[in-house]
Image (cartoon, rainbow, N blue to C red):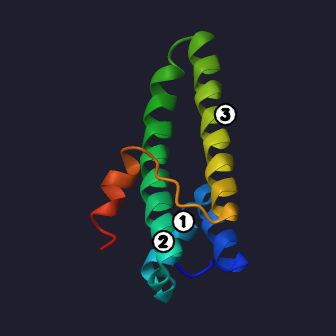
Amino acid sequence: MKPVSAQYKMLAGISYFFWPISILIVATKLKKDRFLRFHGYQALFLGISGTVFYLVSGVFLRLIPGLGESLFNLLASAWIVMALFLAFRCLLGDYFKVPFIYDVAYWDME
């Protein structure tokens, strides 16, 4: 396996924070690189599912006074921590598989 360039590691890491960047990865010739394709698809599916969950849970959790707001903030914080973890793993050049998300994204990678 060839070493991954620092630019590709950075681009893959950023795609977990700003998942529309992952569309750029999977829709252009950048997806020819195995590392970018892996993280691009995983970031895309993770971002889409996270956005849908954020919108749906935000509506329902905000209906519960006090507790719902706190739980919503906790989930948002967990999302940021997970994105930091995944970006860090990208900077190390790792192929970290997010459970379930990887399985959904993997079918389109080959």
Mark 3 lies on residue: 77
Is label 2 in contact with label 1 (beta carbons under 8 Å)? yes
The percent coordinates of residue 29 (x first, y second) are 47, 89
Residue at image mark 2: 23
As displayed, is residue 101 above or below residue 19? above
The three-letter code of the residue at mark 3 reads Ser
Q: Which residue is mark 1?
A: 20
Q: In the displayed structure, does residue 107 sit left or right of residue 6?
A: left
Residue under the point 52% across and 12% down: 64
Q: Tell whether 69 sits left or right of 95.
A: right
Query: Are dots 3 and 1 in contact, CB under 8 Å?
Result: no
Q: Quadrant of residue 77?
A: top right
Residue shown at the point (64%, 77%) measured from the top left: 8
Looking at marks 3 and 1 on the same chain, the residue that comes earlier in the sequence is marked by: 1
Q: Nearer the viewer, residue 33 or 79?
A: 33
Mark 2 or mark 3: whose residue is earlier in sequence: 2
Spatial separation of the CA atoms under disc 2 and disc 1: 5 Å
Residue 93 position within the rendered picture, expressed as x and y whole percent measured from the top left = 63, 66
Q: As rendered, which of 31 and 51 lies closer to the eye?
A: 31
Q: Secondary structure at mark 2?
A: helix
Identify residue type, mark 1.
Answer: Pro
